[in-house]
Image (spheres, rainbow, N blue to C red):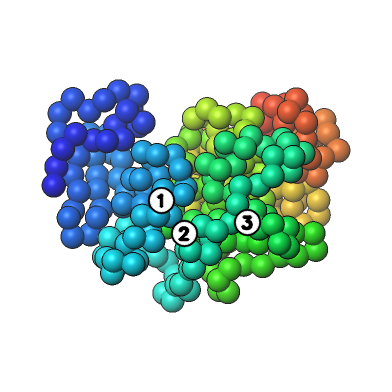
Amino acid sequence: VGGRCPVHHLTVGKEDRSPSWSMNLYSGLWICYSCGAKGNLPQLVLQLTDNSDEAVLVNEYILSSGLARLKAGTPDPAEAQPSVDLSTYRKFVPVPEQLLEYRRIDPVVAQRFGIRWDPQPRHWIIPIISSTGDLWGWQAKGKGYFRNVPTGVPKSRTLFGIERFKAQVAVLVESPLDVVRLASLRPGLLTHGLASFGAHVSTYQLNLVSRWADTIVIALDNDEAGICAAERVARDCPRPRGGINYLRYEHTNAKDIGDMTNDELEEALTGASARPW
């Protein structure tokens, strides 16, 4: 089926004036031959609504209706993908605003990224989403507690924030909450954060970030593990056309983006350079 591109204005800043968009009715894959946008049904819903809940609902409907073919998108890299309990994820509630305020996170931005809260036993719920917008699972994090759900979810084959990444500069961080923090400070389209879910950045993640971004800013934690990981990223990551820079830490004692004040974070970003620390 063809028509005018529904996301044309998001890609090039103006409406599609001629039918240049096409969707395969069997697979659900779509592409705009004019602006180059492409994806699957959940990803289309995410772009149009900017709401992770709506994309989850589409996933849930596809599964409940037996329309597995419409989840195709880019083939999942994991050969045996663990099944995810979408109904459980939807039962989690918005994060209490006082917790978001403490971390300098905008509640609207947190909801947009699908960040949720489990009141008992007081865990942050971080969604693990593929580059095509499919919910693979989530991380439950609390004081002294950490768990990936479902067991075996291949988080090393995606990056937090990748499904909505449209920026020129990717700020590579360890924690997904740092991605949301950065988006709360800089809501524009030039710089977006991507998180590796920890200090270890897999080869798959390196290829992913270098393929999607023009410039990479390495912003892993300013501790021994983060510095070692940053050296490996700089050594092994394929070079994007804009090169690789390091986040500036010289002006602050913060361990990561989440510990910085707004002014410190702005200086860290504007002061990013090809020379580490």
**Does the image show residue 143?**
yes
- Residue 45 lies in what quarter of the image? top left
| Coordinates of residue 58 in the picture (x, y in percent) | 36, 55
Assess whether mark 3 and mark 1 are in contact (beta carbons under 8 angstroms): no
Looking at the rendered structure, the secondary structure element under dot 2 is strand
Q: Quadrant of the C terminus?
A: top right
- In whole angstroms, how far apart are the C-alphas of marks 3 and 2? 13 Å
Residue 135: image tag: 2
Q: Left of 68 or right of it: where is 209?
A: right
The reply to whether the C-beta atoms of the residues labelled 1 and 2 are less than 8 Å apart is yes
Dot placed on the residue nearer the N-terminal end, 1 or 2: 1
Which one is earlier in the sequence, the residue at label 3 or at label 2?
Answer: 3
* Residue type pointed to by label 3: Ile
**Which residue is disc 3 drawn over?**
125
Residue type at the position of mark 2: Leu
From the viewer's perspective, tell me whether residue 1 is left or right of residue 264.
Answer: left
- Residue at 72%, 31% (x, y): give it: 265
Which residue, given by chain and number where applicable, does mark 1 sit on?
55
At numbered mark 1, what does the secondary structure look like: helix, strand or loop?
helix
- Is the residue marked by circle 1 packed among few (<14), some (14-19), or many (20+) residues within 10 Å? many
Could you tell me which residue is drawn at 46 percent across and 49 percent down?
A: 53
